Amino acid sequence: MPLLPYFAFRDYPAGLEAQLMQAVTDTVSSKRYILGAHLEGFEQEFARYLGMAAAIGVGNGYDALVIALKAVGVGPGDEVVVPAHTFVATLNAVLQVGARPVLADPDKATNNLTAASAGKYITSRTKAILPVHLYGQVCQMQELQQLAQEHNLLLIEDAAQAHGAKYKNQLAGTFGHAAAFSFYPTKNLGALGDGGAVVTNSPALADFARRYRNYGESRKYQSELIGINSRLDELQAAVLRVKLPQLDVLNAERQRLAQVYLQALQGTGDLILPVTAPDCSHVYHIFSIRTEFRDQLQAWLQQQGIATAVHYPVPVHLQPAYRFLKYKPGDFPVAEELATTSLSLPLFPGLAQTEQQAVIQCITQFFN
Ligand SMILES: *Cc1c(COP(=O)(O)O)cnc(C)c1O
């Protein structure tokens, strides 16, 4: 078998690539590249998909988090509770607005932040809770909403890995005061470059986000606040308008592939397979398994020409960049264990049956 990458862009569903080429060509011909009809169209379509009042297209997922935090008023002196097991973007966004990220250990089974864990870190300075719907599974939001209400806190969702995932039949990104999405190309809804969106039901927050992403302008050369430049461009918006109607199809294919892995790998060695919590649909942005033999298994698969990934090999609290937060080894035992035992398998729309069977066979061989 030729090398199997951890992730590959495939023409799935068949014909999608041709549609994307057409959308790009049409946008080039339209001669409108910034803040045009495609952005407006995509914002409306994405908001409608989510059942939300507003979606605001921005430059990337990180900016979406920053703008959402700014919009709700998180700033210097505030603390924001974030999961200890996440991509650094979540923390960086909190730091960018001048607030302090306060880490909380995730749940071992789902890898997600829970209300029980977040609750331990609430102080008089806590302003918001920022759960991340990791790997494509929504956090247990009812408990988190209750916790936020009890303590009068803001709830902002990092939905960068969970487009189309549901909890109690409600979509990721629709539970908090605002949510941030990323359209990084490998995300479940991915552009052909950088992109992101802030979503909210609040007209005031939507209005702030819309102005803030475009130098604070409410009209051309009329600035009422000091904004930044973080606009989703027309090319990316046109691409996303082609892909959004396929999101559920793409997610269904991820779910089908996950079921194949789950059935074939059940009871293999000491493997712990991903768990879908009650009331959740999992859209498998990442299919992460756990084993005590992670490094050996990864090396073995690599030898057989199968690439894998580790999400995330060094927990944020042990990364050199965050030393100033004064955390130490042992502070977040679950995050630390996940970092040493997790391995993400190739899972992407268009992964061929022969490719997936090869992954399964190699893993089975390793444990025999
Ligand atoms: C991808 C991602 C982001 C950042 O998105 P970008 O578009 O790359 O800036 C933020 N949070 C999480 C959990 C992500 O996976």
Image (cartoon, grey):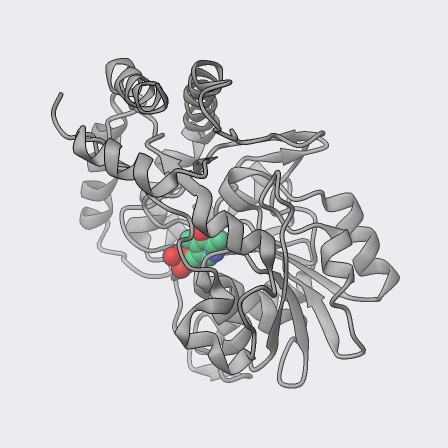
Q: Indicate the position of residue 314 as horizontal and vertical percent values.
A: 42, 59
* Left or right of 116, for residue 249: left
Residue at x 45% of width, y 66% of height = 63
Residue at x 48% of width, y 23% of height = 255
Q: Quadrant of the C terminus?
A: top left
Q: Indicate the position of residue 54 as horizontal and vertical percent values.
A: 60, 52
Q: Is residue 256 above or below residue 88?
A: above
**Which of 4/282 is in front?**
4
Determine which quarter of the picture holds residue 81. bottom right
**Which of 298/121 is in front?**
298
Determine which quarter of the picture holds residue 308. top left
* Left or right of 168, for residue 245: left
Q: Indicate the position of residue 155 as horizontal and vertical percent values.
A: 70, 59
Q: Residue furthest left?
A: 2
Residue 60 in view of the camera:
no
Q: Residue furthest right?
A: 150
Total label count?
A: 0
Residue 59 in view of the camera:
yes
Q: Quadrant of the N terminus?
A: top left
Q: Indicate the position of residue 104 as horizontal and vertical percent values.
A: 65, 61
Image region (quadrant) for ligand 1: bottom left
